Image (spheres, rainbow, N blue to C red):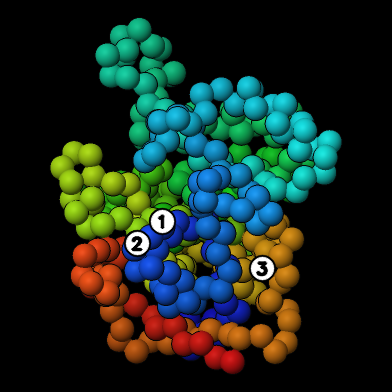
């Protein structure tokens, strides 16, 4: 399959952050720029109209930014999940799948196998995923932004009511790429090359329970360069589709993927599988809808995105690198 001049349905991004106020005004146009026409936006409950809720995102306490008041014990919410089942409410449970890090001063008191670090936090969360699915097998659960092969194995084992999103940036980087580069730092952190290869294989593998969610997270440049407490998140929205397609293309060139990656599989990962899971109209098989065309024209990812008054600066993931251009076609 040719990756240049590739024509696809618009991408559906099932995990994105736009912020609010001036930041949202600055980055919202990047959705269409990235070839995306459907976005599942992560808001706080106070910002979201109840009628428009598709899923409820749950953060364990302390695992990422603004999660200090997150969940400590999921069992305390079991009555909520049971009420959702009894009332036939259709929203999904969207999980940030990491356990909080163990405090360093507790190392001597905790068995090494139980000690949680940034590196193993996702793997340590997986028993919670299994427990939730076992207790509520009909509850739709999405394990967001998977970063490890163990997470993919766990999702496969749960069956059709459990799915996972895979980001564009986790298809590109490993721990060597974010250590020392704040703009590649995200939560969960990128892991080793074997995890990266397994993730891109899943994105190109045609499995319906793995679909695209960018977890694009715009932060002011000053927050990404703010000393030891710099913000976690990669801003990928404006190049979302191209980043995924080029990651798959590179994987094919590197011999990480055996056999041909079909257009049908790319369309499924970027749009169709997620739409089916969330029961949204599938544009991949509907005539008369807009399409996007990816072309190699020497475009480079912008060095920054600025607000109209210049007060906000956001640096995109892989800024300055050559990328495929996205053209909308009616």
Q: Earlier in the sequence, mark 3 or mark 2?
A: 2
Label 1 SS: loop
Give residue 189's position: percent from left, percent from top.
Answer: 36, 44
Q: Is residue 319 above or below residue 325?
A: above
Distance Cα–Cα, label 1 vs label 2 = 6 Å
Asked which quadrant contains residue 18, the reply is bottom left
Query: Which quadrant of the structure image shows residue 22?
Result: bottom left
Question: Pointers 3 and 1 in contact (CB under 8 A)?
Answer: no
Residue 64 shows in this picture: yes
Residue that sits furthest to the bottom in the current view = 330
Q: State the quadrant of the N terminus.
A: bottom right
Q: Tell us which disc is closer to us: 3 or 2.
A: 2
Q: Position of residue 289 (x, y in %)?
A: 66, 85
Q: Quadrant of residue 57?
A: top right
Question: Measuring 28% from the left and 46% from the top, which residue is drawn there?
Answer: 231
Q: What separation in Å lies between label 3 and label 1 (alpha carbons)?
A: 26 Å
User: At numbered mark 2, what does the secondary structure look like: helix, strand or loop?
Assistant: helix
User: Which residue is pictured at 65% across the width and 27% down the height?
Assistant: 77
Decide if residue 261 is in sight here. Answer: no
Q: Nearer the viewer, residue 11 or 26?
A: 26
Where is 219 relative to 8, above or below?
above
Circle 2 residues within 10 Å: few <14, some 14–19, many ≥20: some
**Image mark for residue 23:** 2
Q: Which residue is mark 1?
A: 19
The residue lying at 66 percent from left, 68 percent from top is 272
Q: CA distance from mark 3 to mark 2?
A: 30 Å
Tell me whether the residue at label 1 lies in contact with that at label 2, contact meaning CB atoms closer than 8 angstroms. Answer: yes
x and y percentages locating residue 4 in the rendered image: 45, 85
Q: Nearer the viewer, residue 97 or 127?
A: 97
Give x and y (percent) for residue 159.
Answer: 73, 44
Q: Which residue is mark 3?
A: 272
Q: Which residue of the protein is positioned furthest toward the left in this rendering?
A: 227
């Amino acid at each position: 399959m040719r990756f240049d001049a590739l024509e696809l349905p618009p991408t559906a991004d099932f995990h994105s952050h736009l912020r609010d106020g001036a930041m949202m005004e600055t980055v919202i146009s990047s959705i269409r720029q990235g070839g995306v026409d459907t976005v599942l936006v992560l808001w706080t409950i106070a910002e979201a109209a109840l009628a428009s809720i598709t899923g409820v995102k749950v953060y364990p306490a302390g695992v990422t930014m603004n999660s200090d008041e997150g969940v400590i014990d999921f069992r305390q919410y079991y009555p909520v999940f049971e009420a959702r089942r009894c009332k036939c409410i259709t929203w999904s449970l969207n999980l940030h799948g990491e356990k909080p890090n163990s405090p360093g001063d507790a190392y001597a008191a905790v068995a090494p196998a139980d000690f949680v670090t940034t590196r193993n936090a996702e793997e340590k969360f997986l028993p919670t995923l299994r427990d939730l699915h076992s207790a509520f097998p009909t509850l739709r659960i999405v394990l967001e932004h998977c970063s490890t092969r163990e997470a993919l194995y766990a999702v496969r084992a749960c069956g059709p009511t459990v799915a996972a999103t895979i980001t564009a940036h986790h298809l590109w980087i490993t721990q060597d790429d974010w250590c020392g580069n704040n703009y590649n730092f995200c939560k969960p952190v990128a892991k080793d090359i074997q995890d990266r290869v397994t993730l891109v294989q899943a994105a190109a593998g045609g499995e319906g329970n793995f679909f695209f969610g960018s977890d694009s997270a715009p932060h002011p440049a000053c927050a990404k360069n703010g000393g030891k407490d710099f913000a976690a998140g990669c801003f990928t929205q404006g190049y979302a589709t191209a980043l995924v397609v080029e990651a798959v293309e590179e994987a094919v060139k590197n011999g990480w993927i055996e056999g041909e990656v079909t257009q049908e599989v790319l369309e499924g990962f970027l749009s169709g599988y997620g739409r089916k899971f969330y029961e949204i109209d599938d544009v991949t098989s509907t005539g008369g809808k807009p399409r996007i065309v990816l072309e190699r024209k020497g475009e480079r990812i912008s060095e920054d995105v600025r607000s109209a008054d210049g007060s906000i600066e956001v640096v995109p993931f892989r800024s300055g690198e050559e990328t495929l251009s996205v053209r909308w076609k009616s």
